[in-house]
Image: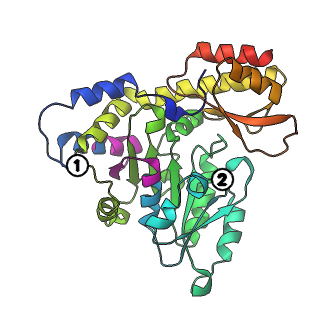
């Protein structure tokens, strides 16, 4: 009963098989190999337009380097106050943007609103170096609360950002889970809704170590090869990152993995509510945040369940919110056992 993180899951069979299939023989280095070229074309097919794709090893690198492509002197990047770039990336966005400032905004269910964004950007008027200059907006999809931005919400934020001449970045560490939940195409929830650059996560959903930065306007990616190399994320054997994506994207495997994880998260959420517990946030992707009595938390952990306690509002002294994360590898039997124990 491991619900600590989807990062705990290994690589899925199609990803492992693709790595093995592409492991032998010789191929040009640094992304000039046939596998990298073929997978890059596949990204363009998935997003229904020509895109510029760059592989990196980690989600932190994807986010920090994507934002660095739009960095400005004294630049300010806006995101939710609980966003991964704000609290979990050890200053990497600030470092790679050359000292850019991250400004966190409050917002219900892990989301920012165009009204709050516009108000915050107004604190940084153009032409006034005392307050720095707006640089980018970043949203997480799915959010750190497990919720998902709808395409209309994304469009409204994109319009606000573009009105100030700055891009909208999407941290898609759990992008597949969001796409699966929405039932829309990848294009409909990215560039068609105004997203300029996407951190396309795959490690949490079945890959071993594979992330991609996707630019929807290749003109904005002209300097990115230099930014990636300078950061140490130009892989000499890039075909092994590409090989993972080859297996991941083939036959809709990435979305099938996400649908499995999402479905089990829904089962957990519904089961806990039926048992009389409440949820801190709606279950929309593959994370569940129930509020449980300490006695129940102790009972679950004594039986072998693994998860983290999580900060949330309106929590009593005898209870805590916890985070439960499902993955493509989660066993439905573990979910059933967890719900049985939680029900007492």
* Nearest the eye: 28 or 87: 87
Which color scheme did the rendering employ for the protein?
A: rainbow
Q: Secondary structure at mark 2?
A: loop
Numbered circles on residues, count: 2
- Which residue lies at the image location 63% right of the left edge and 45% below the top edge? 144
In the picture, measured across the screen, residue 131 lies left or right of residue 248, that is right
Give the residue displayed 51% in from the left and 57% down from the top: 169
Q: Is residue 161 above or below residue 260?
A: below
Residue 236 screen position, x and y as percent: 22, 49
Q: Is residue 152 left or right of residue 136?
A: right
Instruction: Say which element carries label 1.
Output: loop
- Residue at the extreme right: 317
Is-magenta flag for residue 88? no
For residue 120, the mark is none
The picture places residue 316, in percent across and down from the top left corner, at 88, 39
**What quarter of the picture does the N terminus occupy?**
top right
Mark 2 to mark 1 CA distance (whole Å) = 34 Å
- Which residue is disc 2 drawn over? 82
158 and 124: which is toward the camera: 124
The span picked out in magenta is 41-61
Name, please, the residue furthest toward the left: 26
Can you identify the residue that label 1 sits on? 236
């Amino acid at each position: 009963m491991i619900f600590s993180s989807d990062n705990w899951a290994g690589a899925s069979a199609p990803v492992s098989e693709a790595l093995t299939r592409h492991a032998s023989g010789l191929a040009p280095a640094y992304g000039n190999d046939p596998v990298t070229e073929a997978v890059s074309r596949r990204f363009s097919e998935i997003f229904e337009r020509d895109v510029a794709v760059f592989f990196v090893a980690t989600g932190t690198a994807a986010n920090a380097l994507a934002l660095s492509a739009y960095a400005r002197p004294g630049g300010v990047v806006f995101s939710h106050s609980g966003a991964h770039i704000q609290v979990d990336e050890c200053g990497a966005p600030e470092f790679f943007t050359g000292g850019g400032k991250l400004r966190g905004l409050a917002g219900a269910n892990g989301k920012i609103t165009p009204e709050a964004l516009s108000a915050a950007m107004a604190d940084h008027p153009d032409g006034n170096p005392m307050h720095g200059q707006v640089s980018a907006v970043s949203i997480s999809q799915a959010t750190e609360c497990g919720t998902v931005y709808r395409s209309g919400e994304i469009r409204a934020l994109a319009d606000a950002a573009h009105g100030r001449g700055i891009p909208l970045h999407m941290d898609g560490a759990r992008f597949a889970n969001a796409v699966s939940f929405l039932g829309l195409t990848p294009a409909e929830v990215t560039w068609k809704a105004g997203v300029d650059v996407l951190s396309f996560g795959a490690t949490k959903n079945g890959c071993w170590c594979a992330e991609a930065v996707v630019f929807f306007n290749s003109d904005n990616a002209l300097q990115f090869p230099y930014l990636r190399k300078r950061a140490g994320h130009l892989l000499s054997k890039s075909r092994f990152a590409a090989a993972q994506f080859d297996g991941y994207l083939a036959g809709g495997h990435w979305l099938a993995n996400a649908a499995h994880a999402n479905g089990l998260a829904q089962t957990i959420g519904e089961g806990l509510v039926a048992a009389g517990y409440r949820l801190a946030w709606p279950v929309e992707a593959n994370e569940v945040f129930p509020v449980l009595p300490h006695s129940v938390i102790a009972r679950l952990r004594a039986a072998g369940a693994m998860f983290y306690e999580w900060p949330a509002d309106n929590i009593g002294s005898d209870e805590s919110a916890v985070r439960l994360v499902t993955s493509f590898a989660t066993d439905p039997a573990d979910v059933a056992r967890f719900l049985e124990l939680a029900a007492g």
